[in-house]
Image: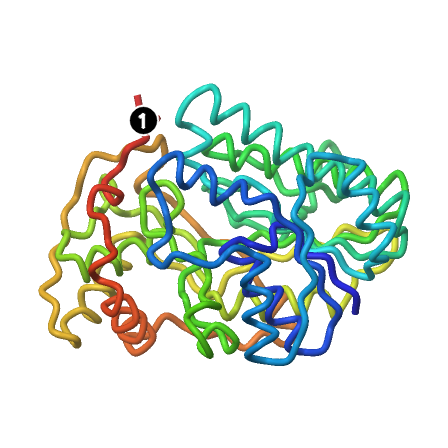
Amino acid sequence: MRIIILGGDGYLGWPTAMHFAARGCEVLAVDNYMRRNIARETSSEALVEAPNLVDRAEAFEEITGKKIQVEIGDCCDYRFMERIFRDFKPTVCIHYAEQPSAPYSMKGYEEARRTLDNNLAVTFNTIWAVKEQAPDCHIVKLGTMGEYGTPPIDIEEGYIDIKHNGREGRFLFPRQAGSLYHTTKVLDTDLIWFYVRTYGLEVTDLMQGPVYGLSTDEADQDDRLLPNFHYDDIFGTVVNRFLVQAVAGIPLTVYGKGGQVRGYLNLKDTLQCVELAANNPPGKGQLRIFNQFTETFSVNQLAEEVKKAGAVVGLKVEVKSIPNPRKELEEHYYNPKHSGLTELGLKPHHMTTEVLVEMLKKIMTYKDQIVPARVLPRVVWNK
C-alpha cells in the first residue's frame, strides 16, 4: 500500500506512520505542527519532548532501516493537498489531521473558530484531493464515539433501521455531540456521506473512543520514537491523565459523580483497527462505519483501576471528586455495539492491572518533567 497519513506528527499519527512503514508500506506523513503549537500556546506540552517530524523519521530509519517520507504543510491549503495526492498517488489516506480536543474547542471564540475552520477544511480538501487526484484511494477517517453522545437507546454501528408510518429505511445513527470538537466530527461524517453518495468515494469512518497508552512495538525501541503523551486537562485523555496524577501524587480528579461511561482502547489497538480497516476496503460508493473501542468503563471505575495499579508499584493514590467543568450527563445508559472490527480479526489488549503498572513504571522515569498546574481543569463550559 501507498499510504498518506494526514496529521502524521500526532499522538495517533506518528505511531501509525511507524506501524505501516515497519510492515513495508510506502508512507508519507503530513503535518503542519498545529497540535504542537496550540499545546505550547495553552501550556499543555507532552510529558516527553519529541523531535520534530523530520528528525523523528530520520531516527526511525536509523533504528529500523525503514523510511517514512515527510511533508510539512497545511492540509487546509487545497493546492498543497492537490500536489501531494497527485505526486504520491496514495492507495489509502488515513485522516487524523484535526484539532482533537473538546476543552480547547470550548475555550473561547478564537479556539472554537480555529477548530471549526481546520477540521472541516481538512476533511473537505481530503475529499476533493481524492476525488480529483486519486479516485481509487480508500479514505480511512478517524471519527469519534463522542459524535453519538449518550442516548437512552443502544448505539448501533453507524446506521439504524427505522420503521415509520408503515415504511422503513436505513439512516445514519442520530448524532448529539457534547462539544464543538465533537460537532465538527458530526459535520465531517455528513460531508463524507454526501460525497460518497454523489461521487462513489470509498470511505471507512472509525468512531473511536478515548485512547490510552504510550507503548507500541516501534516506539519501545527508542524514546525518540515515543508518541506525544499528553496528561493535561486539554489534550490528555482521562486514563493518561490519571496515571500521571498517580505518579505525581495528585489526587485523581473525577469530574462530578463519575458515572460517565465511555468505550476505551489501548494505543496498540488503534493501530490494529486502522490496519484492519486499510486492509479490508468497503468498496466504491460505500461509507462503512466501525465503533472503535474494546471495553467500557465509568470514570469511577477508571480511577479505581489506576489506584489498584498504583498500589502495586508503591504509590498511595487518592481519588477526589471535583465540580464537573463540562456540560454532560454524569449518570446515563450506554450500550454501543462494536462487532465490526472484531469480525475482521481485532485481538484486544485489555486494560489489566499489569498494563497499567507498565505504564506507571514508564511514566515514573519522567516524573521530574510533570507540571502539576497542567492537570486541573482550566476550561469550563458547564455554566
Q: Nearer the viewer, residue 274 or 113?
A: 113
SS class, disc 1: loop
Placement of 253 over or under 364, stated as above or below: above
Frontmost residue, 261 versus 28: 28
Against 302, residue 183 (above or below) is: above
Residue 225 at x, y percent in the picture: 48, 68
Q: Residue 3 placed where, x, y %?
A: 74, 62
Residue under pointer 1: 382
How many marks overall?
A: 1
Image quarter of the N terminus: bottom right
Q: Quadrant of residue 59?
A: bottom right
Q: Residue at x 23, y 48 (%)?
A: 371
The crowd level at tag 1 (other Cα within 10 Å; few <14, some 14-19, many 20+) is: few
Quadrant hosting residue 310: bottom left
Residue placed most toward the observer, 62 or 117: 62
Q: Amino acid at mark 1?
A: Asn
Quadrant of res 40: top left
> Farthest residue in the left direction?
316
Q: Nearer the viewer, residue 166 or 308?
A: 308
Residue 85 appears in view: yes
Residue at 34%, 75% in the rendered image: 355
Is residue 35 rendered to the left or right of residue 362? right
Q: Residue at x 30, y 71 (%)?
A: 362
Q: Is residue 168 visible?
A: no
Q: Is residue 174 above or below residue 238?
A: above
Q: Is residue 201 left or right of residue 372?
A: right
Q: Looking at the picture, how far across and down is residue 354, in whole percent? A: 30, 78
- Position of the C terminus, as image quadrant, is top left
Residue at 63% over, 42% down? 173
Q: Position of residue 84 (x, y in %)?
A: 80, 49
Direction from residue 174 to residue 217 in the image, left or right: left
Compared with residue 339, is residue 43 higher up or lower down, i.e. above or below? Answer: above
